[in-house]
Amino acid sequence: MILCAGLSLLGLAARMDVWLIESIARVIPGPFPHTLGMVAHWLATITIAFGLPLLLLVIPAHWRRLVIAVSIVMSIAAWIPVLALAAHSPSLSMPLVAGIWSGICAITYATRHRMPCDVHPSASA
């Protein structure tokens, strides 16, 4: 969340949103008159920043964590053309950054620590 807030304060999130809008405008022409609003952006960012690590830290096996993290980030990215088709400005840079960064941090933590879900029942006997 601090990374997203910092990017937002520095104006880098707005630049990434403009880049997303320009790149999607090549495929889906036309103006995007509607916006999601800052409340929706921050709610999505908070949900992803805390929900993804919570999910990844209770899933056993490293490959499963990686598949879930990549799937969630790809699902967030898939909303960009959906929003553009609905005439909304596809500005999802903060949720994308939150998903990528929190996924990397959670997977790194899980690979360096012994997680309770990774312990096999036969190992404790």
Image (spheres, rainbow, N blue to C red):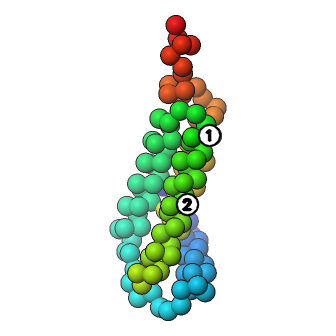
Question: Residue 71 placed where, x, y %?
Answer: 54, 54
Is 100 situated above or below 83? Answer: above
Q: Which residue is mark 1?
A: 63
Instruction: Give the residue displayed 40% in from the left and 54% down from the top.
Output: 47
Is 119 situated above or below 90? Answer: above
Question: Residue 83 placed where, x, y %?
Answer: 44, 76
Which amino acid, by three-letter code, is at mark 2? Met
Query: Splitting the image into 4 quarters, where does residue 18 fall?
Result: bottom right
Instruction: Give the residue displayed 37% in from the left and 67% down from the top.
Output: 40
Question: Residue 100 placed where, x, y %?
Answer: 58, 55
Question: Residue 58 placed where, x, y %?
Answer: 47, 35
Q: Secondary structure at mark 2?
A: helix
Is 40 situated above or below 70? Answer: below
Residue that lies at the very extreme toward the top in this rendered image: 125
Front residue (pair 43, 9): 43
How crowded is the residue under tag 2: few (<14 C-alpha within 10 Å), some, or many (20+)?
Answer: some
Query: Splitting the image into 4 quarters, where does residue 46 fall?
Result: bottom left
Instruction: Give the residue displayed 49% in from the left and 44% down from the top.
Output: 53
Q: Secondary structure at mark 1?
A: helix
Residue that lies at the very extreme toward the bottom in this rendered image: 30
Relative to residue 55, is residue 37 drawn left or right? Answer: left
Badge number at residue 74: 2
Is 56 situated above or below 20? Answer: above
Query: Splitting the image into 4 quarters, where does residue 34 fall?
Result: bottom left
Which amino acid, by three-letter code, is at mark 1? Trp
How crowded is the residue under tag 1: few (<14 C-alpha within 10 Å), some, or many (20+)?
Answer: few
Disc 1 and disc 2: Cα gap in Å?
16 Å
**Nearest to N terminus: mark 1 or mark 2:** 1
In this orientation, does residue 111 appear? yes
